[in-house]
Image (cartoon, rainbow, N blue to C red):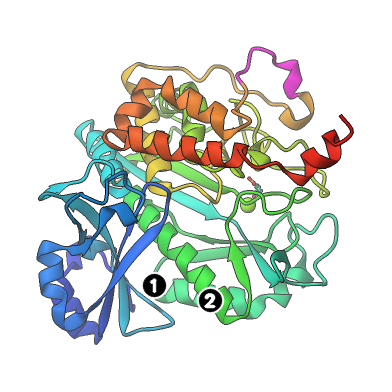
Amino acid sequence: MVGTVSKSETKSLVEFAEEMKLDFFLVSFTDLLGGTRAKLVPAAKVAAVESDGAFFAPFACHLGLGPDANDIAAIPDPNSLIVLPWQPNVAWVASDVYLDGKPFGAAPRVILKQVLQRGEELGYRYKAGVEAEFMLLKKEGTSFQVADALDISTRPCYDQLNLMRQFDFISTVVKNLEQLGWGPYQCDHEDANGQFEINWTYSDALTTCDRHVFFKYMVKTLAEQHGLTATFMPKPFSNLTGNGAHVHMSLWDGNSNVFANASDEMGLSSLAYEFLGGVLAHARGLAALCNPTINSYRRLGATTTTSGSTWSPRYVSYGGNNRTHMIRIPEGGRFECRLVDGSANLYLALAGLLAAGLDGITNHLQPGKRIDENMFVRGSEFPDLPTLPTSLLEALHALTQDELLLTTLGEGAKTYMDFKHQEWNDYSAVVTDWELQQYVTC
Ligand code: GLU
Ligand code: MG
């Protein structure tokens, strides 16, 4: 299979270049705000980049270093290699950022690897899958509209006609994923007009994060080739359901899923419940990582949409196979965190979720009783339940109070806070049209 790499067969980039007839490598890393930065390196020169890295001026990226700082080096991880299905002489490769010869502690992939390492020391391997919802739009002047003018019903979820009108685009993505060996298994039209989801098989958390970065890049690129704009923005339209990036997770010891327990009514082990206890205990701080933008809180904070449901959580709660909670347990052996949205930098979100879960295990935190209610209707009947933040500022405040998550972000914590407070301040400085209409008569 083109572009598929398993750890046992990992070769050097030079060997990959020869074997796969590659002319270029797209040496890429993700910065703290989720930006993907890359250099295109000719295959003939990749040996030096593989050992010493591709160099970047860090101030130009969102990593918190000044214009006076030494160059950072992006050292490619050949395990992550993905050949571009639409440009097969080019391979994308995720990199770890180094500064002054050492892994840079504020780089998201480095942060995730550190938490994964801690999990492995405790004997657990973290596996995850992500449901990356997106919308297909067309640009009209300066605004964006749903690309398909016929996709207008108020409850469009699973609509066959809407789905099949985008068959050319969707099937191209799926064929590419098959070629890459990701095991795509279902695609559907989601609950918002113009919204789709394409599911592929879960893996170890690092691979899923790398693939998430690549998936977004691929979907946006192919959409452009179709004359469209693909967006993963949490809430592009105030009246429509937003774009989630639900994460399914489990811990493994070798080939054994240690979240699974067939004798539990939900199919979860006591270890899984403790992990879940940790995720719930840190949920409000986690929002700053899982919902990192101003726009994230239009999705989380929404009370309804034209379809009748937002499908996004408002409370720090869990249930069974119930989509009105922050955590859903769809079947034994895993649970779904529905908090995460399309703007999340998945390296940071999963680093936070894993750190919270491990904290739950270490301190034997319990998630409390499962709630079997429609939280969209009856949530207010549970006054003791914490609510999720309703703004980025509230989430940042919760993060500043969460020692564990701050420690997890390590060197990146202060920089992340600074960038995000700046984003909040920029946003707060803008007088919106809504305000003008509302208050002009004051
Ligand atoms: N789009 C919804 C969200 O923003 C999720 C819908 C679903 O359950 O797939 O989380
Ligand atoms: Mg979905």
Mark 1 or mark 2, whichever is nearer to me? 2
| Residue denoted by label 2 | 222
Asked whether 33 or 354 is in front, the reply is 33
Q: Name the kind of residue labelled 1 in the image.
A: Leu
Task: Let me know if residue 199 is in the magenta part.
Answer: no
- Judge from the rendering whether residue 55 lies leftward or rightward of residue 413; answer left or right: left
Residue 34, placed above or below residue 28: above
In the rendered structure, find residue 288 and report the number of the disc placed on it: none
Q: Which residue is at a point 77% across and 46% down the rendered structure image?
A: 433
Q: Picture quarter containing residue 370?
A: top right
Quarter of the figure with residue 372: top right
* Residue in the picture at 64% in, 12% down: 384
* Residue 6: quarter of image: bottom left
Q: Is residue 2 visible?
A: yes
Please give the residue where the numbered disc 1 appears in the rendered image. 180
Within 10 angstroms of label 2, few (less than 14), some, or many (20 or more) residues? some
Task: Say which label, 1 or 2, has the lower sequence index.
Answer: 1
Which kind of residue does numbered mark 2 sit on?
Leu
Q: What whole-number distance in Å separates the C-alpha atoms at marks 1 and 2?
A: 16 Å
**Left or right of residue 245, residue 107 in this image:** left
Q: Report the side of 45 relative to 218 (left or right).
A: left
- Please report contact status of discs 1 and 2: CB closer than 8 Å, yes or no: no
Residue 280, percent across and down?
50, 25
Label 2 SS: helix
> Residue 301 in the image: x percent, y percent?
68, 35
Q: For the view shown, which residue lies furthest in the top direction?
A: 384
The magenta stretch is 379-386
